[in-house]
Image (cartoon, coloured by chain):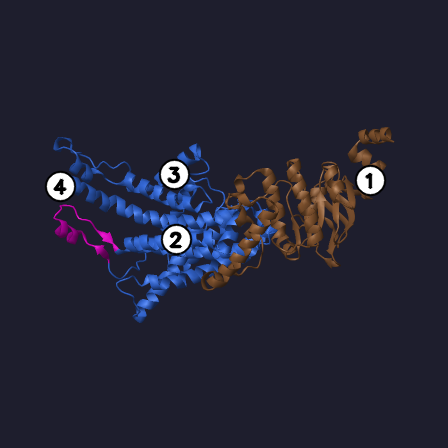
């Protein structure tokens, strides 16, 4: 369980995250919604160790993980993806996935020269795993393409695939659906649900697509101006006056009235 | 016959020296480019790092010579090379721990690193002069020539002689080995791939569990090896003088920038571009032209475009031209 307590992140006078407090239950798929500039991505960045918090505390299963650097969080099973997909452009998609698992024996200079056999065995296993992941994501035909050259949506899938290369505990998905077509979005949604059910990944999803959120997420947290505005099921959130004011807009309210 | 003589003269005075010099610049530029690719700053201390490495090699060479250890006909310096690399690695890793790591924690911008490296440069500069003195040191021993000019003349019956110094042969062979090893390392090994990944996209590399301190450490180790090798080869070929190594910074940076900072292939290509330009422009073409032209058109002057004193101007001019027309360098630098 991730617990965020009274977290602040200030950039000069601008309070991007302004006292956010929330809990993420193990095994849940938590949706994080809110208007642009609500501090969702900054919150991710602080939790994932990219930015140090100004104040506040982040803990995982009771252990304080505030401000740990990203590579250490990775070893604790905390992973994230980026709003704009990142990739190692000059490497193939398969190599991109094979980069992920840390602690490979090829990482020491000694083994590089004297442990060739062990590295080769390990790489074979990794390769098989990477191919499996690519197949799961339905992009196995791109295995040998340079990751810098595949489409934006496929890069998003690759980002998700990266989290499947290791046994993650909790994965933060930052707008995994942005710029992705419907069919692909459904594929991503299926993948997320399967990972959650079969492997017990906890997900936190930033998304603007309410259908996607509705299908995947329970609970949903709404942020605005760096604070947590409301938390509950999507229906509860949709009915919350403050949320409608800040994010969903009154259009929705009128529509709901008409429907009623 | 005149045509053959012209080719031999050209090889002797232009091609062979330029290939050797180019290899030395290429290895030097590889070090600069690796640091730029991983640590994202231009390391002005690189020339003096080379001087430090070479100094250690010289001290060990002298020690070995005094004990009568030699690997003749190869120069004793090759035997001392691993020790030079070791000491340089210690120095660089120490500098990183004491100086650069501080700025890494502050997440300083590249220009601060650059100024810091300038400070490191002055300290190394003083350190080397303090230990070995500012003067010229010769430490080449073993066979002087692979092919002597006179032997070549007797062998072929040509008027022009072709001499290949053993230092030139060693330079080229060592350069090929070093470059092959480096590329194998970067492209085929897990450690090398993490370096490339780190250089390509630091954020993602961190979030993939790559430990930045490890990558940085390995980079310094490789740079230590490259700098010491480059410095020793240059010293064997010419001679060792701390100030010359400081001056080498310009052609080395020109090579790295011309090829594209951050691109290893670019560094090698850049090294040869700079070396060939420098040698061809400062070479007196009179001899070659005399062989090639009809007698009536024999040049009366030296046909030397620039005096050798101005050879550094060549690096500058190429640098300016490349930055004007292709600022990213010939091979689009940025990531390893």
In the image, is A17 to the left or to the right of B40?
Answer: right
Chain containing the residue with disc 4:
B
A37 or B68, which lies in front?
A37
Q: Which chain is blue?
A: B
Residue at mark 3 to residue at mark 1: CA–CA distance: 68 Å
Q: Position of residue A114 (x, y in %)?
A: 46, 64
Quick check: marks 2 and 1 in contact, CB under 8 Å? no
Residue to which mark 3 is pinned: B316
The residue shown at (46%, 62%) is A116
B59 or B192, which lies in front?
B192
In the image, is A153 to the left or to the right of B20?
Answer: right
Task: Look at discs 2 and 4 and give the one toward the viewer.
Answer: 2
Chain containing the residue with disc 2:
B
Residue at mark 2 to residue at mark 3: CA–CA distance: 29 Å
Residue at mark 2 to residue at mark 1: CA–CA distance: 62 Å
Query: Is residue A132 in view?
Result: yes
In which quadrant of the rendered view does residue B259 lie?
top left
Disc assigned to residue B180: 2
Task: Look at discs 3 and 1 and give the one toward the viewer.
Answer: 1
Residue to which mark 4 is pinned: B1
Query: Is residue B129 in view?
Result: no
Colour in which chain A is shown?
A: brown
Disc assigned to residue A235: 1
Determine the secondary structure under disc 2. helix
Specify start and end residues of the magenta stretch as a single range: B144-165
Q: Please tell me if label 4 and label 3 are on a single chain.
A: yes
Q: Could you classify mark 2 by the number of other residues whose Cα lies within 10 Å: few (under 14), some (14-19), or many (20 or more)?
A: few
């Amino acid at each position: 369980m991730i617990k965020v307590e009274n977290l602040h992140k200030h950039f000069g006078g601008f309070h991007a995250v302004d006292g956010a407090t929330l809990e993420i239950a193990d095994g849940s798929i938590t949706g994080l919604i809110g208007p642009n500039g609500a501090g969702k991505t900054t919150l991710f960045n602080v939790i994932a160790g990219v930015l140090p918090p100004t104040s506040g505390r982040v803990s995982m299963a009771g252990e304080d993980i505030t401000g740990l650097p990203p590579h250490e969080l990775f070893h604790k099973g905390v992973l994230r993806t980026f709003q704009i997909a990142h990739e190692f452009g000059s490497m193939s998609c398969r190599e991109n996935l094979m980069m992920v698992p840390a602690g490979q024996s090829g990482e020491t200079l000694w083994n590089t020269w004297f442990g060739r056999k062990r590295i080769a065995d390990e790489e074979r296993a990794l390769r098989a795993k990477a191919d499996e992941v690519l197949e799961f994501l339905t992009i196995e035909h791109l295995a040998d393409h340079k990751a810098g050259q595949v489409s934006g949506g496929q890069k998003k899938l690759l980002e998700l695939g990266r989290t499947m290369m290791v046994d993650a505990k909790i994965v933060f998905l930052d707008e995994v659906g942005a710029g992705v077509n419907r069919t692909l979005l459904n594929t991503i949604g299926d993948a997320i649900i399967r990972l959650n059910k079969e492997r017990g990944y906890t997900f936190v999803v930033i998304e603007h697509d309410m259908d996607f959120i509705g299908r995947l997420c329970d609970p949903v947290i709404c942020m605005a101006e760096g604070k947590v505005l409301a938390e509950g099921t999507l229906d509860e959130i949709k009915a919350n006056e403050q949320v409608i004011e800040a994010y969903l807009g009154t259009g929705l309210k009128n529509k709901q009235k008409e429907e009623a | 016959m005149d045509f053959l003589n012209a080719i031999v003269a050209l090889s002797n005075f232009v091609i062979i020296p330029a290939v050797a010099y180019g290899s030395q610049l290429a290895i030097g530029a590889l070090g600069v480019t690796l640091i730029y690719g991983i640590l994202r700053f231009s390391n002005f201390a690189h020339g003096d790092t080379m001087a430090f490495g070479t100094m250690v090699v010289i001290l060990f060479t002298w020690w070995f010579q005094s004990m009568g250890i030699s690997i003749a006909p190869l120069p004793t310096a090759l035997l001392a090379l691993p020790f030079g690399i070791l000491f340089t690695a210690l120095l660089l890793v120490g500098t990183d721990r004491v100086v650069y790591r501080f700025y890494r924690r502050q997440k300083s911008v590249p220009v601060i690193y650059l100024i810091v490296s300038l400070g490191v440069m002055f300290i190394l500069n003083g350190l080397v002069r303090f230990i070995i003195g500012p003067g010229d040191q010769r430490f080449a021993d073993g066979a002087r020539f692979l092919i002597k000019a006179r032997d070549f003349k007797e062998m072929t019956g040509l008027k022009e002689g072709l001499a290949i110094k053993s230092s030139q042969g060693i330079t080229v062979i060592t350069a090929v080995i070093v470059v092959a090893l480096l590329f194998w390392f970067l492209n085929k090994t897990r450690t090398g791939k993490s370096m490339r990944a780190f250089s390509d996209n630091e954020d993602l590399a961190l979030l993939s569990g790559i430990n930045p301190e490890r990558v940085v450490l390995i980079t310094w180790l490789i740079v230590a090896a490259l700098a010491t090798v480059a410095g020793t080869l240059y010293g064997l070929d010419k001679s060792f003088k701390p100030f010359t190594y400081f001056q080498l910074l310009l052609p080395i940076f020109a090579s790295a920038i011309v090829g594209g900072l951050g691109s290893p292939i670019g560094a090698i290509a850049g090294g040869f571009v700079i070396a060939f330009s420098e040698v061809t422009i400062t070479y007196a073409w009179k001899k070659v032209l005399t062989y090639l032209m009809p007698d009536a058109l024999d040049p009366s002057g030296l046909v030397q475009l620039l005096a050798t004193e101005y050879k550094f101007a060549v690096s500058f001019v190429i640098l300016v031209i490349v930055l004007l027309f292709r600022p990213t360098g010939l091979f689009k630098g940025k990531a390893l």
